[in-house]
Image: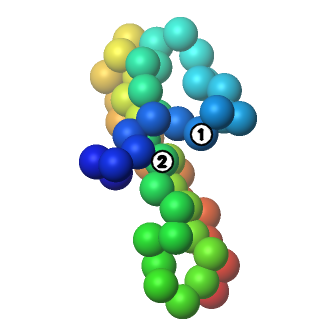
């Protein structure tokens, strides 16, 4: 994540209360995988979305 802490160019931010979405792909060696992590400043909730095929 240190190399690419910005969201992909095709991804729209969820709303105006989110400054940045952290994105990581291929974190599992044997299959497709990605995750998104963001914090809503208004609600102070942190969200993690994980997507993978096994």
Dot 2 surroundings within 10 Å: few (below 14), some, or many (20 or more)? some
Any part of residue 43 in sight: no
Where residue 51 sits in the image (x, y, percent)?
Answer: 60, 63
Q: Which residue is mark 1?
A: 8
In the image, residue 2 above or below residue 26:
above
Residue positioned most to the right: 10
Q: In the visual, does 34 lie left or right of 1?
A: right
In terms of depth relative to the viewer, which is nearer, 22 or 47?
A: 22
Label 2, secondary structure: give it.
Answer: strand
Where residue 38 sits in the image (x, y, percent)?
Answer: 42, 35
Q: Quadrant of residue 47?
A: top left
**What whole-number distance in Å separates the C-alpha atoms at marks 1 and 2?**
7 Å
Any part of residue 1 in sight: yes
Q: How many marks?
A: 2
Where residue 53 sits in the image (x, y, percent)?
Answer: 66, 79
Q: How is the image coloured?
A: rainbow
Label 1, secondary structure: give it.
Answer: loop
Q: In the visual, does 47 lie left or right of 53?
A: left
Dot 1 surroundings within 10 Å: few (below 14), some, or many (20 or more)? few
Tag on residue 17?
none
In the image, residue 25 above or below residue 5:
below
Q: Which residue is drawn at the image coordinates 28% and 48% (left, top)?
A: 2
Tag on residue 23?
2
Q: Which residue is drawn at the image coordinates 41% and 45% (left, top)?
A: 4
Q: Quadrant of the C terminus?
A: bottom right
Q: Which residue is drawn at the image coordinates 71% and 35% (left, top)?
A: 10
Q: In the visual, does 34 lie left or right of 21?
A: right
Q: Which residue is drawn at the image coordinates 48% and 47% (left, top)?
A: 23
Residue positioned most to the front: 3
Circles 1, 2 touching at the beta carbon (< 8 Å): yes
In terms of depth relative to the viewer, which is nearer, 15 or 19?
A: 19
Q: Earlier in the sequence, mark 1 or mark 2?
A: 1
């Amino acid at each position: 994540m240190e190399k690419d802490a910005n969201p992909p160019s095709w991804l729209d931010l969820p709303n105006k209360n989110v400054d940045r979405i952290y994105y990581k792909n291929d974190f599992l060696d044997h299959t497709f995988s990605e995750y998104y992590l963001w914090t809503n400043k208004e609600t102070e909730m942190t969200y993690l979305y994980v997507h993978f095929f096994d």
